[in-house]
Amino acid sequence: MPIVAGIVFLIQLCFAYHALKTGRPYWWIFIIMGFPMMGCVLYYFIEVFPSSRESVKAEKAVRAVAKAWDPERTLREKVADLESCGSVENRVALAKSCMSHRMYADAATLYRSCLNGVYEKDPGRTS
């Protein structure tokens, strides 16, 4: 048991040293040393993890899982955006989402509806 306590204390010292060297607030040292394992876990997930490369990978994995769980979520969000504001940008965004869901006829209709009024001869909207 003393070996485990020594290892935990060494881990705490490493986290406290990291907090000092990276300019984190001093109260992190009290949390790290006051709550042996939970303080280190909190410090890692609140201060270190969000700015790490693993955070970006985890966000991509979460997005992939969310997309696999509900693949039509983005399409519903774009429809809701278009219903709240019928701007050309929202129509183009919905058309792109329709293209990614292989709804080509709906996308073509949306693109054609963008070529009205001021945007009728807009070279950026014809492609």
Image (cartoon, rainbow, N blue to C red):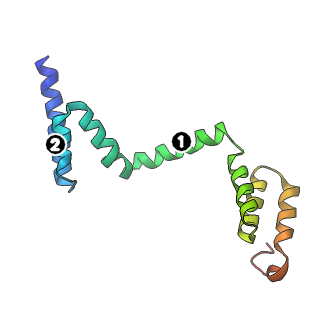
Percent of width and height locating residue 21? 17, 53
Percent of width and height locating residue 20? 16, 51
Q: Determine whether 95 is above or below 112 in the image.
A: above
Q: Determine whether 94 is above or below 36 in the image.
A: below
Secondary structure beneath disc 2? helix
Residue drawn where x is 83% and y is 64% of the image: 110
Mark 2, residues whose alpha carbon is within 10 Å: few (<14), some, or many (≥20)?
A: few
Distance CA(mark 2)–CA(mark 1): 32 Å
Tag 2 and tag 1, C-beta contact below 8 Å: no
Percent of width and height locating residue 65? 59, 38
55 on left or right of 13: right
Query: Which residue sits furthest top?
Result: 1
* Amino acid type shown at disc 1: Val
Secondary structure beneath disc 1? helix
Percent of width and height locating residue 61? 53, 42
For the residue pair 60 and 36, the one nearer the viewer reads as 36
Q: In the picture, which quadrant includes the C terminus?
A: bottom right
* Amino acid type shown at disc 2: Phe
Residue drawn where x is 36% and y is 46% of the image: 49
Q: Determine whether 20 is above or below 42 in the image.
A: below
Looking at the rendering, which quadrant does residue 80 occupy? bottom right
Q: Determine whether 90 is above or below 22 in the image.
A: below
41 on left or right of 53: left
Mark 1, residues whose alpha carbon is within 10 Å: few (<14), some, or many (≥20)?
A: few
Residue, disc 2: 30
